[in-house]
Image (cartoon, rainbow, N blue to C red):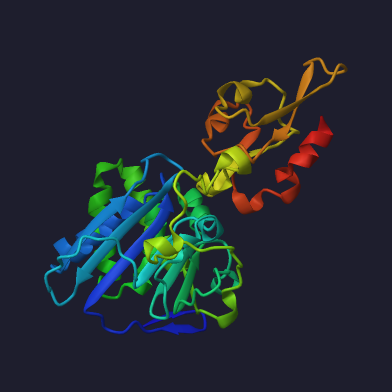
Amino acid sequence: MWFFGREQIEIPSRDRVEIRLEAIGGQGANSAGKILAEVAILEKKFTGNHFSSFGSEKRGTPVKSFVRFSTSRKPIRSASFIRTPNLLVVFHEYMIESHPEIFSGVGIETDVLINSAKSPNELLFPKGVHPRWVGSIDGNKIAHGQNCGLNSVMLGAMIPFLPELGKESIEEVGGRYFVKLSEAERQANLSGLKKGYQGVRVKTALPHQDRINLEEQDQVRLGYENAPFGGVIVNPGNTALKSHEASRKGFAPKLDKEVCFNCGMCDQVCPDFCFVWKINPASRFGAELVGLDYQYCKGCQKCIQVCPVQALTLTAENEITELERSTSWLENQK
């Protein structure tokens, strides 16, 4: 039994637990799944398995990680995707709308944990999604503050949802897993894990939280009922949408124009030509940096690394204003 704010969480005893982690490449979902599997199988001596689906195995692309285990030590013979998880963990809040298929199989006995600065009851889900408990953790802020991986923070936030594994076991196995890092990095990740456990907020899911209207959700049905026509590109990707927002890991560079002296080093290393300039004959530089076009930025952070005066800083997505994101505003500044 766990207490978070005014809510009391009581997870019933379970013979079999299935966990699905949904993330984008680079957030550490695969490593988090490995640690959970080590706790369940090597530490607790449960039967179970773990595997991940990487897609194209590139940063910024969707990643799924699956963990299943039996507390009664019954043989686990299934190696298929987990379609009806007991716990769904979403590492990137933007996936709620950009990849609604992550909620496939979520029902009234599914708990959902999402990396978000919002409170659990402020989160909105696609129509028809009714989980049991909803947890939220501002994992990006904690990971940035502790200088650790997001997966460490999310592992700590999962502890209340997994009483079968226990806080001490997850911390112990996590400490062993991080031993390959430097001592400073190891301690930072352990600190992030503890902060995740302390900072997670959990509430009962409210009926009105499923308010996102989507034209079509990717639900598994018989092939002839929802299979797309052959040769049809149903998702045009950035060719049409021109937005990398859902591929960033929760952070993006932010420009301080008061500090910037228009050296252009950021533009030289940017792989996607995100920086917008204007010609200013009165300026001794000839051109001045207006800002970033965030619809093209994928958050690689190369510009932050080369900026000689720290005019570009790593900033959480929710701290970048709508005005700064506006391409029309950028065009008017030219």
Q: Is residue 303 left or right of residue 160?
A: right
Residue 25 sits in which quadrant? top left
| For residue 155, above or below residue 147 | below
Tell me if I can see residue 273 in this picture.
Answer: yes
Of residues 105 and 28, the one nearer the viewer is 105
| Image spot of residue 150 (x, y percent) | 42, 52
| Image spot of residue 263 (x, y percent) | 68, 20
Image quarter (top left, top right, bottom left or bottom right) of the N terminus: bottom left
Q: Is residue 141 left or right of residue 68?
A: right
| For residue 109, above or below residue 49 | below
Tell me if I can see residue 191 in this picture.
Answer: no
User: Residue at (45%, 66%) from the top-left corner?
Assistant: 103
| For residue 24, above or below residue 10 | above
| Image spot of residue 224 (x, y percent) | 40, 61
User: Residue at (28%, 48%) from the top-left corner?
Assistant: 178
| Image spot of residue 23 (x, y percent) | 42, 53
